[in-house]
């Protein structure tokens, strides 16, 4: 999907107007509504864009507007069904004495000013391994069909058409992820919901860090869309005075997330508040816009190759692969901030990065090598 910069700029303006509850600027003449709305669908934020468009004087033509209204009604229906189903699932699990931790968008919806704004594809839960099978049987009694059980080491998938998909997770991060050490003992740090003792909750700090872990995992593997930055914005706005920042700042260096957290928080402010867009965030910003809601590995490679061709004149797959293995210092600094002061470490950190990829990102390396053979 080719995304013009003027389209993405106006797209972000519309999202900002919804977030800030402001009247958006009218659409520029050199921007087509169809492109804006396709981008909204691509990022799964069409509801937020619709709320902005409703405030405009010059609305899209009848055909496009009718499609937007239809999608708006569908989004409201799906949101209502998902919230009701989530309550039923928690109730059924509690009735069987199963402890369960709601995850991701399932929780993030509650911090948005309107739950319709936070569209999501599935309901995610963490359970202890001993309860996974029993929980699956409960879902089947509730009308779900098991569509992927046992093939994934981390989770099972259940489906109830047309709008419901549930993922039952055994762990928050697989052992192949570098920072799995922080989530391996999460059960020791959970607290019970005051209204339902079988529903568990993370501390605000752990939820914030898990958001970053999940965001970075998708960002570095296949790409991750603007919705994660909107999540970041609302997390900070809702909890900035409640979070234990000393605890967070103690863990970020151990996770090697100092730069990533600064980027995600900085983009949230630059796009949706009055923050400054720093030069080092422009590349990640472009990548996020081009990734869409879920990203694909092919999308990542296409974007990366086009960027290297534009910026460095690299024309061949072999040249791209060499640059991917031995990234330039400026890009390496994003993962290894120590290079800003000690540039002489670059060759050693190239070796560390390659070793890390082979040990912790083996499947990603296999996929990347496979695509180069096509």
Image: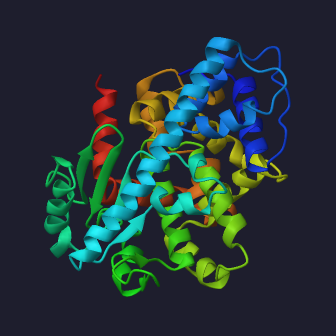
Q: Residue at x 66, y 42 (%)?
A: 285
Residue 242 image position (x, y, % from top left): 68, 80
Give left or right: position of 12 versus 193: right
- Is residue 137 at all visible to an observer of this figure? yes
Q: Residue at x 34, y 62 (%)?
A: 88
Give left or right: position of 123 versus 136: right
Q: Nearer the viewer, residue 103 or 85?
A: 85
Q: Residue at x 60, y 27 (%)?
A: 69
Image colouring:
rainbow
Q: Is residue 255 above or below residue 195?
A: above
**Tally of numbered tags:** 0
User: Which quadrant holds residue 249?
Assistant: bottom right
User: Which quadrant holds residue 265?
Assistant: bottom right
Q: Nearer the viewer, residue 354 or 179?
A: 179
Q: Residue at x 60, y 32 (%)?
A: 40
Residue 153 image position (x, y, % from top left): 20, 59
Q: Is residue 324 above or below residue 339?
A: above
């Amino acid at each position: 999907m080719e995304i013009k910069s003027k389209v993405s700029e106006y797209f972000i303006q519309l999202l900002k107007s919804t977030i800030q509850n402001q009247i958006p600027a009218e659409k520029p003449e050199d921007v087509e509504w169809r492109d804006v709305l396709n981008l909204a669908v691509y990022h799964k934020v069409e509801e937020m864009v619709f709320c902005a468009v409703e405030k405009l004087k010059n609305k899209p033509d009848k055909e496009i507007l009718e499609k937007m209204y239809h999608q708006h009604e569908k989004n409201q229906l799906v949101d209502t069904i998902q919230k009701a189903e989530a309550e039923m699932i928690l109730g059924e699990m509690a009735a069987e004495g199963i402890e369960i931790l709601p995850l991701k968008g399932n929780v993030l919806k509650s911090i948005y000013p309107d739950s319709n704004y936070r569209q999501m594809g599935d309901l995610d839960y963490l359970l202890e391994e001993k309860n996974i099978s029993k929980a699956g049987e409960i879902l089947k009694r509730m009308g779900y069909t098991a569509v992927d059980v046992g093939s994934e080491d981390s989770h099972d998938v259940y489906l109830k058409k047309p709008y419901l998909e549930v993922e039952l997770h055994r762990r928050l991060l697989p052992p192949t992820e570098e920072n799995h050490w922080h989530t391996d003992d999460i059960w020791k740090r959970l607290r019970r919901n005051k209204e339902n003792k079988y529903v568990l909750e993370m501390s605000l700090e752990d939820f914030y860090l898990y958001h970053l872990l999940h965001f970075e995992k998708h960002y570095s593997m296949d790409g991750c869309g603007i919705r994660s930055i909107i999540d970041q914005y609302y997390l900070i706005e809702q909890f900035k005075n409640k979070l234990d920042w000393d605890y967070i700042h103690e863990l970020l260096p151990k996770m090697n997330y100092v730069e990533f957290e600064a980027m995600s928080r900085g983009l949230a402010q630059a796009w949706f508040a009055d923050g400054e867009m720093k030069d080092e965030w422009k590349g990640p910003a472009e990548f996020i816009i081009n990734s869409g809601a879920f990203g694909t590995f092919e999308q990542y490679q296409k974007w990366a190759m086009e960027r290297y061709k534009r910026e460095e004149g690299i024309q061949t797959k072999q040249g791209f692969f060499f640059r991917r293995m031995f990234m330039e210092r400026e890009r390496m600094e994003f993962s290894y901030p120590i290079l800003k002061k000690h540039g002489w470490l670059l060759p050693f950190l190239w070796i560390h990065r390659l070793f890390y990829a082979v040990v912790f990102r083996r499947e990603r390396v296999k996929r990347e090598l496979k695509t180069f053979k096509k």
